[in-house]
């Protein structure tokens, strides 16, 4: 054994190259820097000269849809029940719960039922989730679409992200495997495809048509990839869109299903924003598929659809609980068995999150003692989101060089920004793309953290940024407006 | 578009071949069958003739270390605090909590502190976990080992499984990458290596030496792999062992570190059973490494160690909460940045699980109001585990053809079984390995689900099975003993 210090085994040049190539800007450099700024503000240390004090007193994390990090309150009914599941001994004091702690009978009953289903939230469940909870999800889908759903085709997951990871693991069988992904997109898709050493086949959404999805564009992207030797196996649709908020019309959904059927593509429908819709209406892929199958019996029987949902979004915003599900339609049973085995390696999704999901898909109904408060809280979040979106939209309309369509849904706005040529030069000098440069300056000067459009993909030559509209109040929008004026003046 | 039903896109022959190859017997065919039997018993339907009623009235899941699925109760203090985190409005009624619901001041205080750290358990935390909780983990490691630990080297994870998945994703850079894995092992390692298309380099533990780890065997395995063109980059050590329960002596740990240092191998120390020790003592790799570094300054500075821990094991058994952590020692900062990015794609581990982990590593101390009950509950679990292990051990000693060493730790026994030649023939006819055949018969006739030794790896020509010793009572052991006699008589 040598006595000189050995070199390390792992360095940046010999680790998994696919992990190294993956990009995930939503929690990239800007987000890391924003956390450092937050820690600096929290510590309250006076700056070490020649450092200047920070020119803001709060960090606004608008980089990620994380409602409860800002001021969104959880829904009371859900959390009342979760407390009982964590500490079931409370159920021995039903009278105290009801007389002194604001519990209604339906919360107590729900907790008892869920405990019966999972035994303890500290026990592993079945790999795909507790059967009773999967049944509840199937019931929800049945009510939503008007078509049957079966618990054995429901897989609970640790958020939709984990579901996407599972599905892409199954689909990506070789380096030539391709998956159609909308651009702009949520970077989970490109990052996971890169880690799996498969190909992203981008199709651009049409900004001039409120970020609409043009079938012709998809066909073109498919044909190009196909002619280049890519084995296109699946298409991702984010509906309503992230980061665009756009909802597909029923006709558009039909068109995509027909295209997928023709090309034998698995449809991955990311439907996590299904209740976050301001403009238009949500049409589930499952529902539209079943209607097509009714209209033309036999024709679409073997369409393979995976539809994903999450408790992180909607009016619930329970991101930290890491819960979601996907439903498989038309999958080969042998393939389903492989999916089951794959998820078993990680044992099961968090059980308390499974219970939360059960309540999200099966909330108090009119007439239930907890309904009124639930309904109030739900609508307050819904209206609040729309108000915040509109306020931010109005502010963007006033900003020079910023263009953005009316808010349509999801939790984001994705404006185009046009910056003066001098700013492009300054960005180049700083070895940044102009959108990165803008977002970095915004963070440094206002504490507002957003994500450059390059993190989601954008047409070459265009610049965007994604911001959530979750932050409360107007102060932060004011900060941004002032920053923007200064920025434009400086580089004009 | 054709009007005949199209073939599906995905079938067993064109999905990811590495997923298809992966094996994970802990939740394989036997476990799936046991769940079906459980559902059948629950439904209580009379059997459809010519079916016979099941010859047992409960299913005993001894295939997986899942204490709270059996009768282990959670620790009161932990769950009291978790309830407050889920429903913080309860904190507005501190007097009711204390006068009527059995809460002590320290539970209330802990909940307030954790809420300050995470804001809401419904919000995403930082990708590696909330900073305050990582600091608590670092403090725990410091107290355990007597050497400093830093929160920036702690990564919280959704159970240890997710941590192993992350680390192997980074290490496995090409098909020739090899990782030394003990045999028998927990199949998470082989399954993940297979999915990543990398090589498992097996080293056998020595059953005749109470499943001891022989350095010479490891060197031999390394040299063989190396000579065959495998680029061995890491060594997995499960200490205390799963499924064997064996604890490494300090000298053994030293030997492994020196070997890893010489060969430049990353050490992956799976230390999730660190408190489940009946025989011998637990020596952490981090502690032993730091002592070596003190003794011979400069010599081991660049050793790379990842040490994993979990709330699923120990006396806590909170599997359903999916929480754990790993500490990195000596890793290159650029590699750490890649790990951070990789885990960011999945956003963060469950936040309520992070809070539970905080309490597991920082439980009530002597003098705290909740200490007495905590201590009582902790020791009751500890003693109960040892009693159950001993009872099962005694039963095995009485069974013909079963050999097993004294229980040493973890949650498992891993006996050798020798079955008559006629049973081997019957297994062959059923297209099963003899250990699978035995375990299937055991499940069918008694409802007891265990895992064949082949699921963990065993020396060619030997047969084993892994069973947890978590199930309460002696009834199930009696069922097993009777089954075993009948089985041996039938095939004698």
Image (spheres, coloured by chain):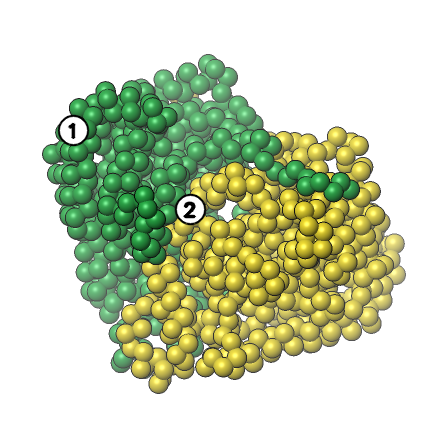
Chain colours: A yellow, B green
In this view, the mark in front (1 or 2) = 1
Under tag 1, what secondary structure?
helix
Judged from the image, the secondary structure of the residue bearing numbered disc 2 is loop
Q: Where residue A329 sits in the image (x, y, percent)?
A: 59, 49
Task: Residue lying at the far front in this picture: please name it.
Answer: B49
Disc 2: which residue: A347
Q: Quadrant of residue A230?
A: top right
Chain holding disc 2:
A
Chain letter of the residue carrying label 1: B
Looking at the rendered image, the quarter that the C terminus of chain B falls into is top left
**Tally of marks:** 2
Q: Residues within 10 Å of mark 2 (few under 14, many from 20)?
A: many
Q: As rendered, which of B465 and A304 lies closer to the eye?
A: A304
Q: Percent from the top left, x then y, of residue A413? A: 73, 64
- At x 27%, y 32%, the residue is B438
Given residues A85 and B256, the one toward you in this image is: A85
Q: In the image, is A121 to the left or to the right of A9? A: left
Res A239 seen here: yes
Q: Quadrant of the N terminus of chain B?
A: top right
In this view, the residue in front, A32 or A349, is A349
Disc 1 with disc 2 on a shared chain:
no
Q: Residue at x 18, y 43 (%)?
A: B479
- x and y percentages locating residue A115 in the rendered image: 36, 64
According to the picture, the residue beneath numbered tag 1 turns out to be B489
The image position of residue B291, as x and y in percent, is 32, 37
């Amino acid at each position: 054994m040598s006595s000189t210090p050995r070199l390390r085994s792992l360095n940046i040049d010999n680790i998994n190259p696919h992990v190294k190539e993956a990009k995930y800007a939503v929690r990239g450099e800007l987000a890391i820097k924003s956390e450092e700024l937050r820690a600096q503000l929290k510590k309250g240390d006076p700056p070490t000269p020649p450092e200047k004090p920070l020119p803001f007193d709060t960090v606004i994390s608008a980089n990620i849809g994380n409602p409860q990090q800002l001021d969104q309150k959880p829904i009371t009914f859900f959390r009342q029940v979760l407390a009982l599941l964590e500490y079931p001994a409370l159920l021995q004091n039903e009278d105290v719960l009801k007389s002194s702690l604001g519990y209604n009978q339906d919360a107590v009953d729900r907790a008892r039922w869920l405990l019966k289903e999972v035994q303890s939230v500290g026990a592993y469940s079945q790999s795909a989730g507790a059967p009773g909870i999967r049944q509840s999800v199937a019931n929800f889908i049945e009510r939503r679409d008007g078509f049957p759903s079966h618990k054995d085709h429901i897989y609970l997951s640790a958020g939709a992200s984990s579901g996407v990871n599972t599905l892409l693991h199954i689909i990506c069988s070789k380096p030539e495997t391709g998956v159609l992904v909308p651009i702009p997109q949520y970077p989970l898709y490109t990052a996971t495809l890169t880690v799996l050493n498969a190909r992203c086949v981008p199709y651009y959404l049409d900004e001039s048509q409120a970020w609409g999805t043009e079938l012709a564009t998809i066909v073109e992207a498919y044909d190009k990839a196909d002619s280049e030797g890519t084995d296109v196996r699946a298409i991702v649709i984010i509906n309503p869109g992230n980061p665009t908020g756009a909802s597909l019309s029923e006709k558009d959904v039909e068109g995509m299903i027909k295209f997928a059927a023709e090309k034998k593509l698995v449809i991955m429908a990311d439907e996590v924003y299904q209740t976050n819709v301001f403009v238009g209406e949500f049409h589930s892929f499952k529902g539209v598929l079943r209607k097509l199958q009714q209209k033309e019996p036999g024709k679409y029987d073997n369409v393979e659809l995976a539809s994903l949902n999450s408790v992180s979004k909607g009016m619930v915003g329970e991101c930290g609980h890491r819960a979601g599900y996907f439903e498989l339609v038309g999958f080969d049973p042998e393939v389903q068995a492989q999916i089951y085995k794959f998820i078993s390696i990680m044992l099961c999704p968090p059980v308390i999150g499974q219970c939360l999901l059960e309540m999200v898909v099966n909330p108090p109904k009119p007439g239930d003692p907890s309904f009124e408060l639930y309904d109030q809280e739900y609508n307050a979040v819904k209206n609040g989101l729309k108000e915040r979106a509109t306020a931010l939209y109005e502010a963007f309309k006033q900003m020079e060089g910023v263009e953005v369509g009316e808010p349509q849904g999801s939790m984001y706005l994705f404006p185009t920004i046009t910056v003066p040529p001098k700013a492009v030069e300054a960005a180049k000098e700083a070895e940044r793309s102009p959108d990165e440069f803008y977002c970095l300056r915004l963070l440094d000067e206002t504490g507002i953290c957003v994500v450059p459009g390059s993190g989601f993909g954008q047409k070459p030559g265009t610049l965007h940024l994604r911001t959530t509209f979750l932050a409360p109040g107007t102060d932060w929008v004011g900060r941004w407006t002032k920053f923007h004026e200064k920025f434009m003046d400086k580089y004009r």
